[in-house]
């Protein structure tokens, strides 16, 4: 059953560059959370539609997944911050520049899947709009983290209007690597894996935050997975990208 799902998803990936094997992810088996609980979360909009999640690094910079920039023009992009709804409320700011990691590749699964967005005007920070600092270290296996987004809540589904979150546990990377090797995907040292009891991120959650809430640090950015809630979710390892992210923000702000 798993193999069939992955196979069909892989074919979809070949047909359309915007479809990642598995997801551009959604929250599965999560729950509604108000934006004040994850004030670093934004929705990245393409024209008027939710495209991906994003994370507030500073009032003028947003972190997201590089694959979220497929088939979009920077002039059409904006972010909505400070709202539990992707479609209304909060603050909307246009994107001025979008910088993908130069080593980003898309197939067979995304690698170096991070990007920095520079906003035209700064966000006003407050209780529902706030920055989050980057983890210095890759989280240990067993760490409980929180992922959030407006992605699909079941397969097949739709972009949920209200923000959802799910707690997921960081997995041992070697074990995750071996797991995905068996189904021909490559988990590399720029990635971390996490799962829960079928709780997961899914299509539409990509680019969103994975946070160690105890220390209030961004540990991951939603990237990919095979299916949603059936296999471990894979995230860009923020500690691995920390220097690149900081440098890129400094150079472009
Ligand atoms: C983004 O929006 C533009 C303008 O509406 C549209 O042409 C394009 O297909 C959209 N891209 C994606 C990936 O949805
Ligand atoms: C991860 O799993 C591997 C293989 O099961 C094991 O050898 C290794 O010690 C584990 N690493 C950690 C940090 O738990």
Image (cartoon, helix red, strand yellow):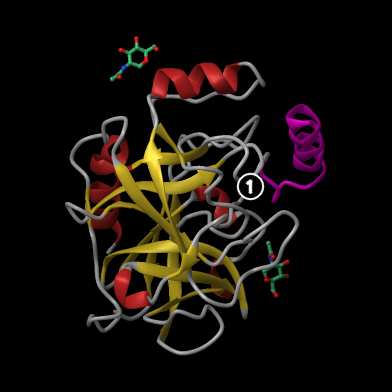
- The span picked out in magenta is 1-20
From the viewer's perspective, is residue 77 above or below residue 19? below
- Residue at horizontal 48 percent and vertical 51 percent from the top: 65
Q: Is residue 218 left or right of residue 84?
A: left
What is the secondary structure assignment of the residue under circle 1? loop
- In the rendered image, residue 37, in percent from the top left (x then y), is placed at 31, 71
Q: Main secondary structure of the magenta part?
A: helix
Instruction: Find out whether residue 49 is within the magenta segment.
Output: no
Task: Report x, y in % for residue 232.
Answer: 53, 35
The residue pinned by badge 1 equals 23
* 18 magenta-colored: yes
Residue at 31% x, 33% y is: 142
Nearer to the camera, 235 or 161? 161
Q: Quarter-wise, where is residue 112 in the image?
A: top left
Say which quadrant the C terminus sits in: bottom left
Q: In screen coordinates, is 190 left or right of 197?
A: left
């Amino acid at each position: 059953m798993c193999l069939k799902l992955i196979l069909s998803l892989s074919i979809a990936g070949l047909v359309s560059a915007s479809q990642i094997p598995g997801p551009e992810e959604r929250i599965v088996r999560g729950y509604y959370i108000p934006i004040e609980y994850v004030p670093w979360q934004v929705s990245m909009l393409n024209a008027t539609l939710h495209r991906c999640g994003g994370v507030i690094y500073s009032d003028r910079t947003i972190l997201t997944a590089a694959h979220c920039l497929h088939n979009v023009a920077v002039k059409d992009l904006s972010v909505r911050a400070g709202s539990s709804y992707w479609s209304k409320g909060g603050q909307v700011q246009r994107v001025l520049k979008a910088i993908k990691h130069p080593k980003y590749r898309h197939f067979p699964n995304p690698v170096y899947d991070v990007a920095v967005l520079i906003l035209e005007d700064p966000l006003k920070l407050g209780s529902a709009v706030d920055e989050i600092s980057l983890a210095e270290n890759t989280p240990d296996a067993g760490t409980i983290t929180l992922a959030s987004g407006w992605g699909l809540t079941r397969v097949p589904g739709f972009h949920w209007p209200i923000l959802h979150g799910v707690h997921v546990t960081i997995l041992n990377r070697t074990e995750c690597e071996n797991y995905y090797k068996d189904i021909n995907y490559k988990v590399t040292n720029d990635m971390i894996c996490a799962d829960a009891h079928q709780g997961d991120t899914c299509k539409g959650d990509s680019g969103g935050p994975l946070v160690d809430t105890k220390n209030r640090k961004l540990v991951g950015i939603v990237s990919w997975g095979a299916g949603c809630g059936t296999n471990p979710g894979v995230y860009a390892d923020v500690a691995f990208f920390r220097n690149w992210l900081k440098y890129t923000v400094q150079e472009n702000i």
